[in-house]
Image (tube, rainbow, N blue to C red):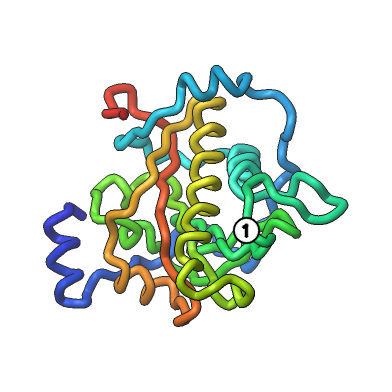
């Protein structure tokens, strides 16, 4: 679906997801993340870029596992520390994964994907046409109910910093394994809120597409 069509449907309140395809699981187990190896940090930083053209092939289960662990996984099991910082350890940002099989939420403690909705909502995650067919779109959602000790005026700022750190972790992982990604803020917030069934305490922050790069894809 092209950008103009999405804009028009959004105005009409008719921008929706599509029926899920493939096996829809209540919980999608992930293999243990491979937390060693990859490129040295400075090499990954050299290769970090945004891409806007993707092949539709799915990531392997291992790649999906490693990607999600890099974004928000537990790297200190003794106290549940994560790979990305969170002010006052509120852990207010949830990472949702929009796949052809449905909308899932990453559960770091279980290192698994939990089904939220058996619907393909990828095309609602952005106005760009590439989000419709890329293998996965990530959605960063702040849950303000976990931020009771943070002043209300500062909650969006704190959550946005946490989401940005998670997004950069994803960029560095993708650079390390030659995947393509782009972080995005141009999407219909009302349509995506409806499609995901979010509550008033939940706030959309960012979306991010991940997939295999096209050789002729534009990068920045």
Residue that protrudes farthest toward the right in the picture: 78
The x, y position of residue 78, in whole percent, is 87, 52
Residue at left 34%, top 67%? Answer: 17
The quadrant holding residue 111 is bottom right
Which of the two residues, 150 or 187, is positioned nearer the viewer here?
150
The x, y position of residue 81, in whole percent, is 75, 51
Which of the two residues, 81 or 33, is positioned nearer the viewer here?
81
The x, y position of residue 22, in whole percent, is 49, 57
Is 26 drawn above or below residue 80 in the view shown?
Answer: below
The quadrant holding residue 213 is top left
Which of the two residues, 126 or 63, is positioned nearer the viewer here?
126
Helix, strand or loop at label 1? It is helix
Residue bearing the label numbered 1: 87
Query: Going by the image, does 98 lie left or right of 61?
Result: left
Query: Going by the image, does 57 lie left or right of 26?
Result: left
Viewport quadrant of the C terminus:
top left
Q: Residues within 10 Å of mark 1 (few under 14, many from 20)?
A: some
Residue at left 47%, top 57%? Answer: 160
Is 182 drawn above or below residue 199 in the view shown?
Answer: above
Is 1 drawn above or below residue 46 in the view shown?
Answer: below
Residue at left 24%, top 49%? Answer: 129
Does residue 176 appear anywhere in the picture? yes
The x, y position of residue 206, in whole percent, is 41, 55
Does residue 98 appear anywhere in the picture? no
């Amino acid at each position: 679906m092209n950008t103009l069509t999405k804009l028009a449907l959004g105005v009409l309140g008719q921008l929706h997801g599509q029926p899920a395809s493939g096996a829809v699981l209540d919980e999608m187990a992930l293999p243990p993340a491979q937390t060693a190896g990859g490129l040295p940090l400075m090499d990954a930083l050299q290769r970090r870029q945004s891409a806007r053209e993707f092949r539709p092939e799915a990531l392997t289960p291992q790649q999906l596992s490693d990607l999600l662990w890099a974004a928000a996984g537990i790297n200190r099991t003794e106290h549940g520390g994560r790979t990305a910082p969170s002010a006052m350890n509120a852990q207010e940002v949830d990472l949702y994964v929009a796949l052809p099989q449905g909308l899932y939420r990453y559960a770091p403690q279980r290192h698994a994907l939990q089904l939220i909705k058996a619907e393909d909502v990828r095309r609602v995650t952005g106005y760009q046409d590439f989000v419709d067919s890329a293998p996965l779109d990530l959605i960063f959602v702040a849950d303000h109910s976990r931020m009771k000790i943070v002043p209300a005026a500062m909650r969006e700022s704190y959550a946005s910093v946490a989401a940005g750190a998670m997004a950069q972790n994803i960029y560095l992982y993708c650079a390390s394994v030659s995947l393509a990604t782009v972080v995005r803020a141009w999407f219909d917030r009302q349509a995506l809120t409806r499609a995901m069934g979010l509550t008033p305490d939940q706030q959309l922050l960012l979306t991010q597409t991940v997939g295999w790069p096209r050789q002729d894809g534009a990068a920045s």
